[in-house]
Each structure stands twice: as C-alpha cells, then as structure tokens.
Amino acid sequence: MIVVGLTGSIGMGKSTTAAMFAAAGAAVYDADAAVHDLYRSEAAPAIDAAFPGTVIEGVVDRKALGARVIGKPAEMKRLEAIVHPLVRAREIAFLDAAKTSGVRVAILDIPLLFETGGEARVHAGVVVTAAARVQRARVLARPGMSEETFAAILAKQMPDTEKRRRAHFLVDTGHGKPHADRTVRAILRALAGLG
C-alpha cells in the first residue's frame, strides 16, 4: 500500500482536493475531522483540565479554545501535547484497516505534515497550493476570520514556497476544480506505477 501525505496551507483547497482523491478511489484519513471528533469525545476532558472554561457540556468550544492558544506558542504546545497523540492513534488504526482491506493508495490529509515531521511516515507528499492572493481571498471570506487570526495561522505554518519545494506532487487549485481533479487523477496514475 502506498501512503501519501496530503498537505497545504490554510485556504489552499486541501479539503476539496482530499475529496477528489476519495472520489477517484483512494482511502482518505482526515486529521482535521479526527480533531473535531476528538473535541467531542476523548480529548475534551484533558482539554478542559488544561484550559478551564473551554469545554461546554462535554464538547470543546473551538472559539474559546482558539482565544486561549492562537498566537501563544507555549499554550499551543500544551494543546498539541494532548491532541497529537490521539490523532496519531486514529491515523494508525486507519492505515491498519486500509491495508487489511487491500487499499492500494491511502491518503493522509494532514495540515501540518512537514511542520510535524509527518513526511517521514509517507512514501510521497502532495502539496495543495494556489496564488497568495487566491489564498488570502478564500481565508478572509470565512465567517469570523480576521487579519490577525489569518496572520497567526500563517506564522505557524511552513511557507507555501517551502512546502512546494518539498513536495513530490503539486495540485494547484487556483485554476478551478476541473484542473485540480485532472491533476489528482494524474497523481494517482503515477502512484499506481510505483506500487
């Protein structure tokens, strides 16, 4: 089974690209979805203990938690120490199930693939990218997104130029969905040749 890391900075179209890989037949693990689920389950008690007042009726209030950790490196590290091992355990379970099922290509959709050293766990890296102006317009159009929050998120992420340099494959989403979908299918054909 070929394991591929899919990553990209905020607003680049990574989630849409992951859906394209899934539609084309790849098994996809979504780290963000795992975090959302963990915030409603096993991570909530530990987050509540570390960041009192950020969990309401057993569910992490993402806005309250964000106010406590965004732009605060020490607090972010405390949160990551709680969440990352749980996300990793789910990733391992996903890969085990995919391998048992005979999946040929498994995609790990991991926002901070390079920042966390995740590229060591995959055979190839796919970076989703777009022009900076496209990224900015997409992100600032999100409800509740501010310039300050966008800047803080970008500061935590490896620059797009460096991600592109490290990638085995690129998906440029700035040219529309049909173009990105053709690129995804070409990547899967190339990966099939490796398997």
Image (cartoon, helix red, strand yellow):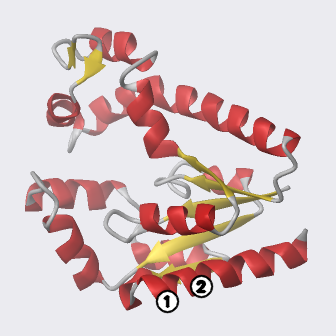
- Please state the total of marks drawn on the protein image: 2
Separation (CA) of disc 2 from disc 1: 6 Å
- Counting from the top left corner in percent of width and height, residue 173 is at 42, 81
- Counting from the top left corner in percent of width and height, residue 172 is at 46, 84
Residue at x 43% of width, y 82% of height: 177
* Residue marked by disc 2: 183
Q: Which type of secondary structure does the marked residue at label 2 adopt? A: helix
Q: Quadrant of the C terminus?
A: bottom right
Locate residue 9 relative to residue 136 in the image: left or right.
right
Residue at x 78% of width, y 81% of height: 190
Locate residue 193 relative to residue 124 in the image: left or right.
right
- Counting from the top left corner in percent of width and height, residue 96 is at 79, 36
* Crowd tier of the residue under label 2, counting other residues whose Cα lies within 10 Å: few below 14, some 14–19, many 20 or above: some
* Residue marked by disc 1: 179
Q: Is residue 27 above or below residue 67?
A: below
Locate residue 23 relative to residue 112 in the image: left or right.
right
Q: Quadrant of the N terminus?
A: bottom right
Residue type marked 2: Thr
* Crowd tier of the residue under label 1, counting other residues whose Cα lies within 10 Å: few below 14, some 14–19, many 20 or above: few
* Front-lying residue, 81 or 126: 126
In contact (CB < 8 Å): disc 2 and disc 1: yes
Q: Which type of secondary structure does the marked residue at label 1 adopt? A: helix
Residue at x 77% of width, y 80% of height: 189
Q: Quadrant of residue 126?
A: bottom right
- Counting from the top left corner in percent of width and height, residue 3 is at 75, 57
Q: Quadrant of residue 82?
A: top left
Q: Is residue 185 above or below residue 116?
A: below
Residue at x 28% of width, y 30% of height: 75
Q: Is residue 120 above or below residue 166?
A: above
Residue type marked 1: His
